[in-house]
Image (cartoon, helix red, strand yellow):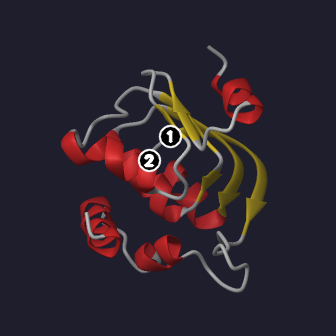
Amino acid sequence: MDLKKTLLENNYSIVSSNGYSSVKTGIMPIMLAMKDDLHFFEGCSVADKIIGKASAMLLSLSGVKEVYTPVLSRSGQEIFEKYHVAYEYDELVDYIVNRKGDGMCPMEMTVKDIDDMNEAYEALKKKLAL
């Protein structure tokens, strides 16, 4: 299965080599998948429409093997580099923009100053009230 093609030709926000896909936006599809199994993406290839630091930390914590995204933030790239996750992107941006388009994504803001992936996971769970 060509995950990149599947992501780009369908209305998915995320697709994974373990058969998981979702149309939910933001980090919610990743959080929901990891809620019952922290290592849900272990060894997987994943394609996600937008990856910022929050998504990169979650996917790295879960053990993802490789990632494709049309849009990657610089801080997300740093996480993939740090945790040796193979990645491919089309556009590298300074940060992920919020839905209003007037500032930083609240999830990226939540983990902006967090380096520990477990701490990031807990902060994001709290932010989303999961």
Residue at x 25%, y 63% (from the top left corner) = 130
Residue flagged by tag 2: what amino acid is it? Pro
Q: Residue furthest bottom?
A: 102
What secondary structure is found at the residue carrying circle 1? loop
Residue drawn at x 65%, y 64% as measured from the top left: 74
Coordinates of residue 89 in the picture (x, y in percent): 72, 45
Image spot of residue 79 (x, y percent): 49, 57
On screen, residue 117 above or below 3: below
Relative side of 78 to 94, left or right: left
Q: Are marks 1 and 2 in contact (CB under 8 Å)?
A: no
- Residue marked by disc 2: 29
**70 relative position to 55: left or right:** right
**Secondary element at image label 2:** helix
From the viewer's side, name the closer residue of 94 and 106: 106
Q: Nearer the viewer, residue 25 or 18?
A: 25
Q: Disc 1 residue type? A: Val
Q: Nearer the viewer, residue 129 or 68?
A: 129
Which of pointers 1 and 2 indicates the residue nearer the eye?
Answer: 2
Could you say which disc has been placed on residue 85 in the image? 1
Q: CA distance from mark 1 to mark 2?
A: 19 Å
Q: Which class describes the residues within 10 Å of circle 2: few (<14), some (14-19), or many (20+)?
A: many
Q: Residue at x 24, y 66 (%)?
A: 122
In the picture, measured across the screen, residue 17 lies left or right of residue 129, that is: right
117 lies above or below 17:
below
Label 1 neighbourhood size at 10 Å, few (<14), some (14-19), many (20+)? some
Q: Position of residue 44 (x, y in %)?
A: 44, 27
Q: Quadrant of residue 10?
A: top right
Q: Residue at x 65, y 47 (%)?
A: 49
Earlier in the chain: of badge 1 and badge 2, it is 2
Residue 9 relative to residue 46: left or right: right
